[in-house]
Amino acid sequence: MSYEDAMKVLGYEPGAIVSPHLPAFGKVAEKLEELVRTTKDEKLQGSFRDELDRLNDALAVVVEQKSREPSLRARGMMLRLILSLLLVGCVVAAGWYGNRYLIEERQSRDKQDLETLAGNARLAVESRDWARAESIYSKLVDLEDDPERVREGRRRISEGKDEARRQKLGFLLGSTRAAIEERNWDEANARLEELQGMEASHPEVAGLIKVIREGRMDDQIAVLLEESREALQEEQWATLAEHTAKLESIAPEHEQLAGFKAATAEGMRIMEERRIRARKLYEKALSLDQGEFSEAALETLREAIRLDERKEYEDLYNKMSGYTRLLMVPRDYATINEALASARPNDKIRIGAGTFTESLTLNVKVDLEGVGHDESIIQCDAESASVLLATKEASGSRVAAVTLRQTGIVHTGERYPVVLADGSELSLEDCHIDKGSGHGVAVINGGTGRLRNVQVSECGWDGLAVYGEGSAAEAGDCRFQLNIHHGVDAWGGGRVMITKSRATRNGLAGVVLMSKGVQSELIQCTIDGNREVGVSISNGARAVLRANRAQGNLLGGILVAGDGTTVAMEGNVAEKNNKFGILIDRHSTARPFTDNIARENTGEQLNRQAVIPEEVVPPPSLLDVSVHKAVEAGPSSPE
C-alpha cells in the first residue's frame, strides 16, 4: 500500500499531519477486532476483517513514513482529524449496532429453534417414537438452559418405554393363549418364543410351554386315532400298521392301542392270505395260457392283481391281453371314438395318459382300459350326454383305470348320468366317477352294473342309482361319497349287492332300498356321516344286512319302515348317530335279528315296534327310461 493510499484509508489528504491521532485509530482497530470475534454472521464478519486489515495496513505505512508529514503549522489539521474520526466512528458504530442486531436476531431464532425441538420431542414421546425422542433430547442437552425440562422429557421416555414393554408382553401373552384356544400350536409357539425373547423369566412361560407341548401331543394322537380308524374301515392294513406303530411310540399306554395292534395283526394275516390266494390265481392263469384270448384267464389275473399288485402278474396280464386285437389311443387313433368305430367284439382299447373330451357310446363288447384313474381322464359337457353309455349290444364290456366326469352344471329335472348301463352288462374297475350333474352310475332297463374298487363322488343326484325290473348292481370295495342325494339307491324293481364298501358324507341317505318284493344285500359296509339316515329300507323291499356299521349319521342309523318290508339283520352296529340307532316299523319284519348293537346314539337306541306313519316314507317315483333319454332323480328320503 502506498503512502497516499494509506492516507486515503485514514480519511486524509497526502501532506496532512496524522501522528497525533494514531492512538485514536488504535482504539478503532481494537473495536474492529472485537467485532470480528463476536460477530456470528460470516458475511459481516468477513467485512469487518477486511476493514481491520486495511486499517492496520494503512497505520503501518503512515508510521513507517512519518517523515513525510508537514509541520504542525499546517492549517485545517484539527478539522480534518475530527472529520476522519467522525467517519471512522460512524463506520464502527454502524458495525457495532448491526452486529448487536444480528446477535439479538440469532438469539431469537435460536430460542425459536429450541422451542421447536422441545415441541418435536414432546410429539415423539406422545407418538411413542422413543428413538426419535431420545435423539432430540440428546440435542437439547447442549442447547437447553433449563436442564429440568430435559430431565422431565427423559423420565417420560423411560416410563413410556416401560409401559410399552408391559403392553407388548400382555399382547404376546394374550395372543399365545388365543392361539392355544384355537389349537394353533405353531402360532402359539411363535408368540411364546417372542415373549421369551423379551422376558425369559416371565412366570407364565413354563406353564405355557407345557400346555403347548401337551396340546400338540393330544392333537397328534387324535389325528393318528382318526387315521387309524379310517385305515381300519378301508382295510388298508399296511397304513394301519404304520399309524399303530406311531401311536405306540408317542403314547404307549393309550387305551385304544391294544385294539389297533390286534386289528393290525389280523390285517397282516388277511394280507398274507390274499398274497397266497393271488399266487394261486396267477398259477391258474398260467395254466390257462394257451396263446389265445381267454376272458376267464384275464379275469383270474385281474383278481390276482387286486389282491397283490406284483409286476409278474401284470406282465402276464399284458401278455395275455395282447392275444386279442389291441387299439392304442392316441398312438393308433387320435380319439377314443375313432378306436370304438374300428373295434370288433373282444377288442382291447388301451387309453394313454391325458384328458379326452368326448362322449362314448359302446355298441360292441370291448375292453376299455386306461393307465390309471389319475392319468387317463374322459369328460364331456353335462348338458349334452353321458360320458359313457353302454347299450345292450355292448354287454360284457369292461371299463377300467380311468376317471369319468362331466363338466358344467345342469339344474333341469332330467339329467344325464356320468355312466349309464342301459339294458347292458357293464363292468367298472379301478375307476373314479365324479362331478356328474345327475347320477354317477345309473343302471336301467334290466341292465347290470359290476363295480370293483370304484369311487363315485360329488354328483348332483345319487352315486349309484339302480331302477327298473331286472336292473341290478354289484359293488365291492367301492366308495360313494359327497353326492348331493343318496350314496346308493335301488327302487322300482332294481336291486343291489354291496360288499366291503362305504357310503359316506352324502347329502341325503347313505343307502336307500325301495324295490317292493326285491331282495338287496348290504354286507360288511360302513355307512357314516350322511346328512340323513345311514340305511333306509321301505316300500315292501326285502334286504339282508350283515356285519355293517352305521355311524355318525345325522338323522339315524338304520330305518326299516312300511308294511311288508322284510329285513334279515345279523351283526350290525349302529353307533353315535343322531335321533336313533336302529328303528323298525311295527308293520315291518326283522327276522332273523341277531347280534345287532345300538349304542351311544342320541335319542332312541333300538326300537323294533316303532309307530311310523305312512307319510314319513313316501312311495318311490316312477321314471321314464326311454332309450337315449336323460334320467330323472330317484326317490326322496324319509321325512
Image (spheres, rainbow, N blue to C red):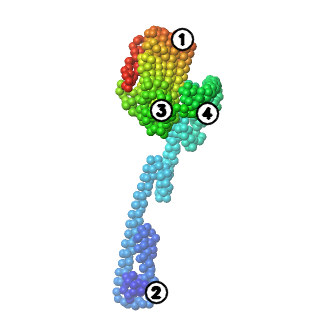
Circle 3: residue type: Thr
**Near-viewer residue (52 or 315):** 315
For label 1, the residue is 593
Q: Residues within 10 Å of mark 1 (few under 14, many from 20)?
A: some
Q: Quadrant of the C terminus?
A: top left
Foreground tag (2 vs 1): 1
Q: CA distance from mark 2 to mark 1?
A: 145 Å
Expressed as whole percent of the image width and height from the top left, the position of residue 302 reads: 56, 28
Determine whether 452 is above or below 82 in the image.
Answer: above
Residue under the image location 54 percent in, 19 percent down: 523
- Element at label 3: strand
Question: 372 above or below 494?
Answer: below
Query: What distance separates the C-alpha of mark 4 from that of mark 3?
Result: 26 Å
Amino acid type of the residue tagged 1 in the rendering: Phe
Determine which residue is flagged by label 4: 312
Given contact means CB atoms under 8 Å apart, are the residues at marks 1 and 3 in contact? no
The vertical placement of 34 against 226, above or below, is below
Spatial CA span between label 4 and label 2: 128 Å
List x then y, in percent, for residue 435: 43, 30
Quadrant for the N terminus in the image: bottom left
Residue at numbered disc 2: 64
Distance from Cα at disc 3 to Cα at disc 2 = 119 Å
Which residue was labeled with disc 3? 403
Tell me the mark number nearer the camera, choosing from 3 and 2: 3
Labels 4 and 1: the sequence-earlier one: 4
